[in-house]
Image: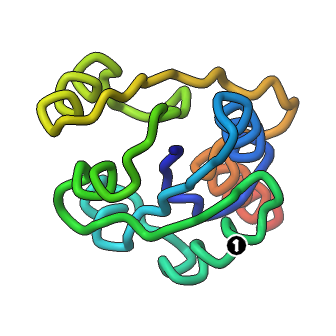
């Protein structure tokens, strides 16, 4: 299982999902709800259903679902993954997640994926910043 906002799909997302896909025989991707993304300080350009549709079209992804609003562990309980893949920039502690899952009766291994070595921007915020710089440079 991999999770994220996936607002602007980019090479960093593809790297993250490719690495996550290698960890098992099936990849379920949880797309963050609009309310969850905004609560965590992100203002998505695309709504949750559009982001879900885009992620579900990726060949790497076996299934894409919207996360629950509120308790992220409800989604984990629904999916019951063996492995949770975290992006290099996701602010979660692997051991805390494993402990919480164990308390829910789920034995889950949490693994941190590496940052992409792609030469361009590898995060949505880097892409947005570069676009703004390009626009401001033309005015």
**Where does the image place residue 53, in percent across and percent down from the top left?**
65, 78
**Where does the image place residue 107, in percent across and percent down from the top left?**
31, 27
In this rendering, position of residue 132 left or right of residue 79:
right
The residue at the point 85 percent across, 31 percent down is 118
Query: In front here: 127 or 115?
Result: 115
**Where does the image place residue 114, in percent across and percent down from the top left?**
65, 21
The residue at the point 32 percent across, 49 percent down is 76
Above or below: residue 102 compared with residue 25: above
Furthest residue in direction right, as rendered = 119
Above or below: residue 62 compared with residue 54: above
Above or below: residue 31 compared with residue 94: below
Q: How crowded is mark 1: few (under 14 residues within 10 Å), some or many (20 or more)?
A: some
The residue at the point 56 percent across, 55 percent down is 29
**Where does the image place residue 39, in percent across and percent down from the top left?**
25, 60
For residue 64, what is the image quadrant?
Answer: bottom right
Judging from the image, the colouring scheme is rainbow
Furthest residue in direction left, as rendered = 103
The residue at the point 49 percent across, 68 percent down is 65
Q: Mark 1 points at which residue?
A: 54
Quadrant position of the C terminus in the picture: bottom right
In terms of secondary structure, where does tag 1 sit? Answer: helix
Above or below: residue 74 compared with residue 90: below
Counting every numbered tag in the picture gives 1
In this rendering, position of residue 77 left or right of residue 25:
left
Query: In front here: 139 or 7?
Result: 7
């Amino acid at each position: 299982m991999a999770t994220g906002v996936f607002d602007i799909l980019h090479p960093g997302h593809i790297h993250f999902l490719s690495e996550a896909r290698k960890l098992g025989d099936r990849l379920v991707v949880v797309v963050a709800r609009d309310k969850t993304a905004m609560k965590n300080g992100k203002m998505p350009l695309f709504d949750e259903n559009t982001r879900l549709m885009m992620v579900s079209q990726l060949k790497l992804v076996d299934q894409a679902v919207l996360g629950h609003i509120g308790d992220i562990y409800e989604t984990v309980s629904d999916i019951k993954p063996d492995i949770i893949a975290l992006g290099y920039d996701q602010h979660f502690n692997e051991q805390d997640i494993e402990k919480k899952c164990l308390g829910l009766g789920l034995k889950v291994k949490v693994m941190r994926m590496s940052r992409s070595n792609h030469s361009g921007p590898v995060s949505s915020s880097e892409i947005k910043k570069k676009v703004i710089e390009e626009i401001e440079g033309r005015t």
